[in-house]
Image (spheres, helix red, strand yellow):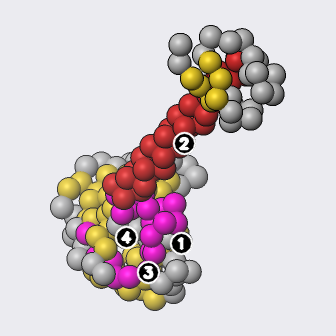
Amino acid sequence: MALIKCKECNKEMEDTVSACPNCGAPKETNKTNEMQKKGIKRLWIVLGIIVIGVAVLLLALPSSFKQFIGLEDENGVYRLTQISVHVDADDFVGNDDTGEFAAPEIYAIIYHNQDKILTTFDKAKEDKWDATFYPTKSITWAKGDTLTIKIYDKDLMDHDPLFTIIENRLYNGELTSKSKKGSIIKITLAKLK
């Protein structure tokens, strides 16, 4: 026979009795209260593990994702390291000098806010509808700035661009934008400071 405390009145009672001799609380109530306290302890432990897990996850997230969801400041200096362009046939209707349908000779003009900062002609890789440019242009970016990329065909230099992409946020990593007709631009940026 052992002595236990009543969970209602805190007086000692024998563990063999079915109710507290002092307040009359049944012994089961005492077990239920004990179980509730254990459940609350477990809940706090689980919540603590979740909080620590979220904190570790936020620390481990790549900088580009943190900037994308607004956890990290986008202001700073970025180096534009690569522009990959895929022109969808729906964004382009062109003819060569013989009147035959021809793929575009792609180049890009890039504007930071309204200032022209770069024109790309030298392509490192190109096939019929794709081009990749490797500029090394730095951009000092502040929240609210815009980066406008206009894609042209060399044969149609005096005409409107094939398509235009406007970015309002920059972050370290790769930005991908798609035109309404399916053309794609991927911009790779490295945040310098």
Q: Is residue 166 above or below residue 42?
A: below
| x 64%, y 29%: residue | 12
Query: For mark 2, does the 10 Å Cα neighbourhood hold few (<14), some (14 to 19), or many (20 or more) residues?
Result: few
| x 24%, y 54%: residue | 126
| x 40%, y 68%: residue | 171
Q: Is residue 71 magenta?
A: yes
Q: Amino acid at mark 1?
A: Asn
The answer to whether the residue labelled 1 contacts the one labelled 2, judged by CB atoms less than 8 Å apart, is: no
Say which element carries label 1.
Answer: loop
Label 4 sits on residue: 108
Label 1 sits on residue: 168
Label 3 sits on residue: 75
Say which element carries label 4.
Answer: strand
Residue 163, image x and y in percent? 51, 62
Q: In the shown orientation, is residue 133 left or right of residue 68?
A: left
Q: Earlier in the sequence, mark 4 or mark 3?
A: 3
Q: Earlier in the sequence, mark 1 or mark 2?
A: 2
Q: Is residue 192 above or below residue 66?
A: below
Q: In the shown orientation, is residue 82 left or right of residue 177?
A: left
